[in-house]
Image: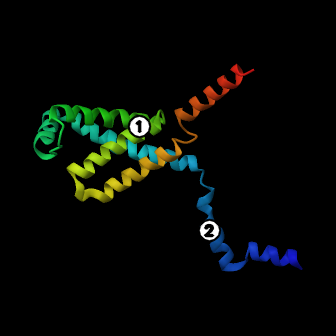
Amino acid sequence: MTAISEQSSSNPAGFIGLYKRIIKLPERIPFSLIQLAARVAVAHVFWQSAQTKLASWPVTMQLFANEYNLPFVDPSIAAPLATAAELAGSVLIFLGLFSRVAALMLLGVVSVIQIFVYPENWAEHLLWASLLLLVLMRGAGALSIDRLAERHFDGANAGSER
């Protein structure tokens, strides 16, 4: 009698059982796909931003000089630095190469934008920061160059220990 009652309590029938099975379906999504989606989404944001800066460099310089008002950094240094960080960070994040370093770098960019440039866009910046924090905390995932490098170097170290 206990086996029957345990089975029915762990896998209830009817509407409640169906509901519980449906809400557990997302748990079957591989986390590596979530990591990949986060990387692609945030890479796209920063790649597009860098491309916009490069498309009209005189306008970019004017924005850095007149609108952005970054303290302590000359616009002639801030503009190329920000553009380089966005380009490099987006490519590295997309590929999953040195992804934690790239995420940290882009978190710095997001922080500067939030604090000094567009503080009213906090919700958008929080979204970007959340994706970057996921990469920083959990890595690029199984579908990344970081993972390939990790496997390669772990295999090379195992061979040299013999």
| Residue positioned 35% across, 56% down in the render | 126
Badge 1 marks a residue whose secondary structure is helix
Q: Which residue is mark 1?
A: 102
Q: Between residues 118 and 10, which one lies in front from this camera angle?
A: 118
| Residue positioned 14% across, 45% down in the render | 69
Left or right: 143 with respect to 47?
right
Residue 53: % across, % down: 22, 37
Above or below, 87 against 120 in this view is above
Query: Where, by quadrant of the figure, is residue 103 drawn?
Result: top left
Q: Which residue is mark 2?
A: 22
Badge 2 marks a residue whose secondary structure is helix
Above or below, 98 against 130 in this view is above
Left or right: 63 with respect to 135?
left
Residue 83: % across, % down: 26, 35
Residue 79: % across, % down: 20, 35
Q: Residue furthest right?
A: 1
**For the residue carrying disc 1, how many other residues have a C-alpha within 10 Å: few (<14), some (14-19), or many (20+)?**
many
The quadrant of the picture occupied by the N terminus is bottom right
What is the distance, in whole Å, between disc 1 and disc 2 at their CAs? 36 Å
Residue 20: % across, % down: 64, 71
Q: Between residues 85 and 51, which one lies in front from this camera angle?
A: 85
